[in-house]
Image: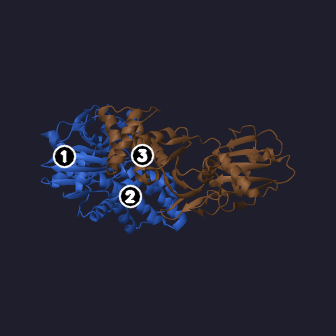
Chain colours: A brown, B blue
Amino acid sequence: MTDLSSCEGACAPVPAPDWIAVDWGTSALRAWAMGRDGRIHARAASGAGMGSLSRAEFEPALIALIGPWLETAAAPVPVIACGMVGARQGWQEAPYRSVPCAPLAGALARIAPQDPRFTMAVVPGLCQARPADVMRGEETQIAGFLVAEPEFDGTLCLPGTHTKWVHVSAGEIVSFQTCMTGETFALLSRHSVLRHSMPGEDWDGAAFADAVTDAMTAPQRFSARLFALRAETLLAGLVPGAARARLSGLLIGMELAATKPYWLGRDVVIVGAPGLAPLYAAALAGAGVAARTAASDGITLAGLARAWQGERR
Amino acid sequence: MTDLSSCEGACAPVPAPDWIAVDWGTSALRAWAMGRDGRIHARAASGAGMGSLSRAEFEPALIALIGPWLETAAAPVPVIACGMVGARQGWQEAPYRSVPCAPLAGALARIAPQDPRFTMAVVPGLCQARPADVMRGEETQIAGFLVAEPEFDGTLCLPGTHTKWVHVSAGEIVSFQTCMTGETFALLSRHSVLRHSMPGEDWDGAAFADAVTDAMTAPQRFSARLFALRAETLLAGLVPGAARARLSGLLIGMELAATKPYWLGRDVVIVGAPGLAPLYAAALAGAGVAARTAASDGITLAGLARAWQGERR
C-alpha cells in the first residue's frame, strides 16, 4: 500500500523533531522533520496519496514515513498537515472555510491518531459559494507565498491537474476559479482517439501559441477543433509534437477565455509546476499579460510553518 | 480472440448466400447472409472489432463468424464490408474519397483473403480537406438513408462516440463535421474527478436543457463550468442525475455552438443511436430547431445492399 521507494533519509533514526510538516495530496505524501530552529532535520516522501488509501490506511501510511522520527521523542510530536488528507474521502473531513478570508484564518482541524507518539492538525480547505468552488492544499501554498510577499495584490495562478486562479488582496483570498485543464489534457492525450496523433513528448511552441489564440478568439469552435487533430494527422501529415501542443493550446486557451476577470489588467504571478508554468506564461504573454513566475519549491513548507506558528500563539 | 457470444443463428449451416454484408466497426463486427431475393438468410455478430485486432487476426475473425455460411457455396461468395476494417489500423487501408461526392461514388477497395471461399470488397471512407475531417462507415449509413429519401436536402446528424454532422444535397455529401462529444463525455464522467459527482444512471432533463443553453450562450465559460459540478456536489448537494445531465448538456451545447452552420435554418434529421438521438433532439429543440429522428436500424444494411448493386452493374 505504501510506496517507500522515494524515502529520502527517513529510514534512519534522527533527533526528535520539534514538529512535523506534512503535504498530503491526492497522489503523494511528503513530510519534513522540523527543528526548533526552523531548520529541516529530515525529509521523506511516498506515493501513499489520498487517492490510493482507504480511511483505515491513512495512519499506517503516515507512520511508515515518519515513524523513525518519533522513536526518540519524549512527548507527542505535533504534525501539521495540508491537502486532500482533509477531504471527504480523506482521513477525516476538515470543514471548509468560506472566502473571502486569509488563507490560514481560523483554527486547524484536529484528527486523533491511535498512535500516542504524535498529535495531528489539518489546515482546512477553502470554499466559495458562487460560483461554487473548493480548494485543499493551495491555501497553504498561498499562505507560503504571502510570507515572502505579504503586500501582494493581484492574481496567483497555480497550474496543475486542477489549476487554480486566485484573486488575492490585503492578505486575503477574495475569490478563486478552478479549471480541470490538466486532467482533461491527460485524458484526451492518453485515452481518446487523439492519442494516436501524439505519441512521444515532442512539442511545437508555435503550434501551441496559435491554438491558444484560436481558442480564445473563437471558443464556440472548440468542439470542432478536437477531432481535426486526428484528421490532420491522417490527411495532412500533422506531426505528433504539433498535435500535442495544439491540444494543450486549445485547452489552455479555453481556460484563459473562462478566467479573463482573473488576469485582465491584473498583476499575475504563476506559482510553481516547472513543466506547466512556462506554458501558462507563454499563453498569457500571447494575451498581452506579462506574468511573473515564482518558484513553488518551499512555499508549501513555508505555509505549513506559518500554520504551526499560529498554533503556538 | 473472437467473441461469438452473440452469434445469432450463424452456427448451423445455411443455404449458400448470394453475398454477405459486413459492418466492421471499432468495437463490433456484424454480418448478414443475403439471399438472391434480397432477404436476410442469417445474421451474426461478435465483439471482434477493428480496435481489438492485429492485421493478421482480421481474416480468422471474419471466418469465425461467416464460416458456416461458406460451407455449401459452389463459388466464392462476395463479401461487401464497410467501417474501420478499411482504416490504416484495419485489415487493409481503403483510401479515402474526397467530398463533395455521392456517399458510394467510385469503386470499392479490394482485399484478397487467403481463404478461397470468399472475395472481399470494402466501401472507402470519405475525407474533407478543409476543415480536415474523415469518416468510415457513416458514408454507408448515409447511402442507406438516401435509399429511402433520395431527394433529401439538409443535414444528417449521426450521434455516437464521434458524432457526424453531414450536409447532404442532390444525392451528394457536400461537407461534414466530426465532434468527439461522446468520447469526451465517457472520459470525463468515468475517469475524471467528476466521476465522484455522477454515479449511477439518473438523469435530470431540465438540468440538461439549461446546460445546453448555458454552453451555447457563453461557450467562453466552458472551462469554468466543469469543476463547478464537483464543487456543487460538495457544497450544495448537487445530485448525481443533475450533475450527469449537466455535463452532457455542456458538451452537447458546445457541439451545437461549433456546428451552427449545419443546423441553423436547415432541415435536420437525427439518424440512429436510441440512447443519444433524444438528447440531440432535445438540445436542438432548445435552439429552436425541430429535428426529425430516423431509425438507424437497417440503414447500414441498406447502404451495403446499394454498394452490392453497384458492384453487379
Q: Chain of mark 1?
A: B
Secondary element type, mark 3: helix
> In the rendering, at what x and y percent does residue B298 appear?
25, 54
Same chain for the residues under marks 1 and 3 in the image: no
Subunit of label 3: A
**Camera-nearest label, 2 or 1:** 2
On the rendered structure, is A217 left or right of A57? left
Q: Nearer the viewer, residue B260 or B291?
A: B260
Disc 3 residue type? Leu
- How far apart marks 1 and 3 lie (CA) works out to 31 Å
Residue at figure coordinates x 36%, y 47% from the top left: A216
Residue placed most toward the observer, A41 or A37: A37
The furthest residue to the front? A151
How many labels, in total?
3
Q: Which mark is residue B310?
A: none
Find residue A138 and report its horizontal and vertical position in percent: 59, 52
Q: Which residue is mark 1?
A: B173
Residue A40 at what x, y percent from top left?
Answer: 75, 41
Toward the viewer: B21 or B10? B21
Disc number lying in front (2 or 3) = 3
Element type where label 2 sits in the image? helix
- Mark 2 neighbour density, 10 Å: few (under 14) some (14–19) many (20 or more): many
The image quarter in which residue B52 lies: top left
Q: Are marks 2 and 3 on the same chain?
A: no
Residue A251 is tagged as: 3
Question: What residue does disc 2 label?
Answer: B250
Q: Amino acid at mark 1?
A: Ile
Q: Position of residue A105 (x, y in %)?
A: 65, 60
Give the residue type at disc 2.
Answer: Leu
Packing grade of label 3 (10 A; few <14, some 14-19, many >=20) is many
Q: Earlier in the sequence, mark 2 or mark 1?
A: 1
Helix, strand or loop at disc 1? strand
